Image (tube, rainbow, N blue to C red):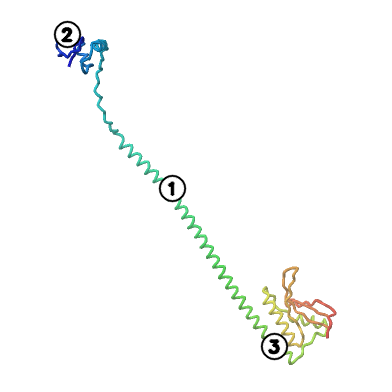
Amino acid sequence: MSYCTKCGNEISGDDLFCKACGAKQDISTTAKNSEIYVTPAANEQTIEKLTDVTPVTFSSVSAPEPRMSPKKNPNMPVTILSVFLAVAVIAAGFLGYKYIDDSNTINTQQETILGLNADKSSLQSDLSTAQSTIQDVNGQLSSTQSQLATAEEDLAAIQAKYPLRNFESLNKLQLWASSHKQTDYNYADDQYATALAIQQAAMEDGYLVSACICWASTTGYHYILCEAMVGTTVYYWHPEDGIVKIYMADIPVD
């Protein structure tokens, strides 16, 4: 709809003159004013103001550009596969290292077990040897105890028949000791057995001879001796040599 530029009367868009006031119409201005006016002006002053309005130019609105969908990266599957392969290689390396470490630990433990088993076998062998030695010693001890019991029985029988006496002189003791020398042995029980044999021989001859085991605290050795008295003096000798030596003099005798 268009309006007259002078009186504001409504006119058609192609009228050259206003039908109300007869004013000539400018088609371009009328067209522009038609975009501005909504209703006819109430008075002429309003119409004049409207004619002075600067035409509004509407810029053309460009159509929005079409949105482009993102292009698919053709290398994406390769990248994903590479990542998976890298993770798989790292995992395989870790598992391999863990397996090797566990294998080394197992080998070390097995070597330790083998060493302990070897030590156990050695200890068992030593124990068997010690037990065998103990059995031998016990057997020798039993034999010695049996010999001692027999000697004591013989001594009791001899003493009952022949009262024992000391040697009358040192010369007689020396002759008797040298004639009853015994074989030398390495073990104490065997050496003591020789001293007991001398004691028994002396009893059979009617003499009093003692079989003694002496411990020397200064040297840490023990000695097997035979002792006898001449008067108030005590003499001793080793069963294997028969050499008589003085031990203690002036022993009080009841």
Q: Quadrant of residue 194?
A: bottom right
Asked if residue 85 is positioned above or below residue 50 in the image, the reply reads below
Is the C-beta separation of discs 2 and 3 under 8 Å?
no
Instruction: Mark 2: give few (<14), some (14-19) or many (20+) Cα within 10 Å.
Output: few
Q: Secondary structure at mark 1?
A: helix
Using the rendered view, name the quadrant where residue 54 is placed: top left
User: Is 95 positioned to the left or the right of 214 in the image?
Assistant: left
The answer to which of 120 and 106 lies nearer the viewer is 106
Q: Looking at the picture, which amino acid does disc 1 mark?
A: Tyr
At label 3, counting other C-alpha atoms closer than 10 Å, the crowd grade (few under 14, some 14-19, many 20 or more) is: some
Locate residue 49, reporting x and y percent. 26, 11
Residue 154: which disc?
A: 3
Kind of residue at badge 3 = Asp
Indicate left or right for 195 with 41 as reference.
Answer: right
Q: CA distance from mark 3 to mark 1?
A: 84 Å
Asked which secondary structure carries label 2, the reply is loop
Q: Is residue 253 left or right of residue 102?
A: right
Tell whether label 1 touches label 3 (CB within 8 Å). no
Report the disc number at residue 21: 2
Tag 2 near tag 1, CB within 8 Å: no
Sequence-first tag of 2 and 1: 2
97, 25: nearer the viewer? 25
Which residue is found at the position 70% from the left and 78% from the top? 192
In this view, 83 is above or below 201 = above
Q: Which residue type carries mark 2?
A: Cys
Could you say which disc has been placed on residue 97 in the image?
A: 1
